[in-house]
Image (cartoon, grey):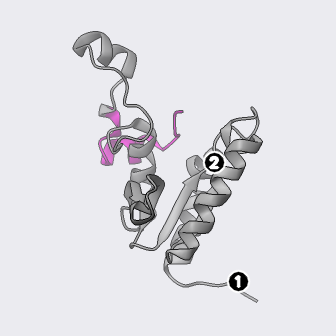
Amino acid sequence: MNMKVSKEVAKKYGLDTVPNWKQEAAKTGKERPKDGKTGQDKPAQKAFLALCKAHGIPVPDCEYRFAESIGRKWRFDYLFDGWLAVEQEGGIWTGGRHNRAVGFIADAEKYNHAVLLGYSVIRFTPQQMESGKACAFIKRVLNGEGEQS
């Protein structure tokens, strides 16, 4: 997935140096990082981190592992300030894992346990992440802004 950020933001945060993984693999023999590995080197994560910086919100922990105390190896896509978990839900138009029964049930279990452990979980589509709408909303949550009347 290619996140779209302006050329200025990309240059400011070094995104113009994000490797093309096919070319990089051909040069180094290393494969693209797999899901579940720490991923600040993944292009989509770099782009999201740049958007966070551009929106003036703190840089989150990426692929934060939680619930190990209950024997689980769950990860949040992003964790802000130790309590606000952000999940990017992909495959919404293609019948991806998050929309099929088994994946949906697993996600519900993960999110419910996260609440028991004191986390707040918010979810976004890739389009919301790419457009900056997610960052704007995350900023409001971190600033304690409720609905304006």
List the single residue furthest toward the top.
26
Q: Considering the numbered disc 2 on the image, is that residue within a helix, a strand or a loop?
A: loop
**Extent of the magenta region:** 1-16
Identify which amino acid the numbered label 2 is placed on. Glu
In the depicted structure, whether residue 97 falls above or below residue 65? above
Mark pair 2, 1: CA separation: 24 Å
User: What residue is drawn where x is 45% and y is 74%?
Assistant: 83
Q: Which residue is mark 2?
A: 89
Q: Which residue is mark 1?
A: 147
In the depicted structure, whether residue 120 falls above or below residue 66? below
- The quadrant of the picture occupied by the N terminus is top right
**106 with respect to 52 (left or right):** right
List the single residue furthest toward the bottom.
149
Q: Please tell me which residue lies in front, 72 or 66.
A: 72
Image x and y of residue 122, in percent: 60, 65
- Whether the magenta-drawn stretch holds residue 5 is answered as yes
- Mark 1 Cα-neighbour bin, 10 Å: few <14, some 14–19, many ≥20: few
